[in-house]
Amino acid sequence: MNVAKGGYRVFSANSNTACTELAKRITERLGVELGKAVVYQEPNRETRVEIKESVRGQDIFIIQTISRDVNTAVMELLVMAYACKTSCARNIIGVIPYFPYSKQCKMRKRGSIVCKLLACMLAKAGLTHIITMDLHQKEIQGFFNIPVDNLRASPFLLQYIQDEIHDYRNAIIVAKSPAAAKRAQSYAERLRLGLAVIHGEAQYAEYDMVDGRHSPPAVKNTSIHSGLELPSVHRLQVPFPGIELPMMMPKEKPPITVVGDVGGRIAIIVDDIIDDVDGFVAAAEILKERGAYKIYVMATHGLLSADAPCLIEESAINEVVVTNTIPHEVQKLQCPKIKTVDVSMILSEAIRRIHNGESMSYLFRNITVDD
């Protein structure tokens, strides 16, 4: 029996009107209307989703941009995905430009890998495919048992550098830490520019002295009453004595330094996320001291939490360029230095190709593993 191919619908899973802007841009590029759905919070803060049109046999794309209320946004996505699943949608694709909890993708002491937990929850709720952008660690794709397309924002940021930064040929790409060197190297090679690395930035100390890992537990004194002699087979055995392991030398933060010549250059710091800007402000100060006359910060996701806009405004940074994967209109009002690059084009093209069953390789042309 031949079944006619169904259509597709694009929904926004966010109850925050500021967060629906990206969804509107995507639907405008696709030439379709945004799906009719109501997402709101009950007085007791429960999330309720009501889909106002049929999704049976359709490809459903749920766009969810993450606001400051991360947990509410996650619940909105889960509830809407499950609503589509129980309404017999054919495929449910989550378009999550910034994947939440992506920083919690490694085990730390007695914590948990929350990113893995979220991946399992999304699949369980009914999502059959994920579209995201610039995951904090590419290995996060391995947390899913469903397909994940990790798009890149670098072509748009590179285009911004070429179009908006005058005399960018006199620029140098800067990694604010050795961990960001690969990303910075990718930008430098594409723009045919030099590379500098800042070493010695502030490190968060891990106070694990009470973690129990430096020595085995103390052996309790298991003395036996002298008036009772037990057979040797029933005597309490003394626990195996602790083993002396080599002690790992503690890390010592070196003085902050810049590897590379930035004197008389435009310094462009690149990273994937800008959240706590203290590290970027400190990097800008050292670059200014070393002779850089303009300092730009480029990143995909502009979380810009807390008082980040004020710190940027008062710093030596000339401009912060981020994409619209996360809404930050309020932050832009507080700090005119923040600029936005629109990435709705690549997201809408990914939606079109997935629905039509076309190859996604076109969106990853000239993309290497390190990008």
Image (cartoon, grey):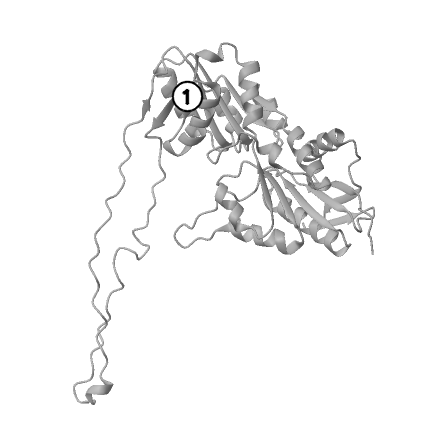
- Is 79 drawn above or below residue 320 in the view shown? below
Residue placed most toward the observer, 148 or 85? 148
Q: Is residue 358 left or right of residue 245?
A: right
State left or right for residue 84 relative to residue 78: right
**Residue 2, horizontal then vertical, whole percent:** 82, 53
Q: Image point 54% across, 36% down: which residue?
A: 134
Q: Look at mark 1 in the image and give the residue it sits on.
A: 284
- Please tell me which residue lies in front, 4 or 318: 4
Q: Residue at x 39, y 25 (%)?
A: 282
Q: Is residue 13 visible?
A: no
Residue at 67% in and 47% down: 76
Task: Pick whichever, 212 or 56, lies toward us.
Answer: 56
Query: To which quarter of the image does residue 215 belong?
Result: bottom left
Location of residue 61 with respect to 322 vertically, above or below: below
Where residue 352 appears, as percent x and y from the top left, is 71, 36
Amino acid carrying label 1: it is Ala
Viewed as shown, does residue 209 lie left or right of 354? left
Tell me the quadrant of the picture where the N terminus can be found. Answer: bottom right
Residue 271 visible in the picture: yes
For label 1, count other residues whose C-alpha is less than 10 Å away and answer few (under 14), some (14-19) or many (20+): many
Q: Secondary structure at mark 1?
A: helix
Q: Is residue 37 left or right of residue 330?
A: right
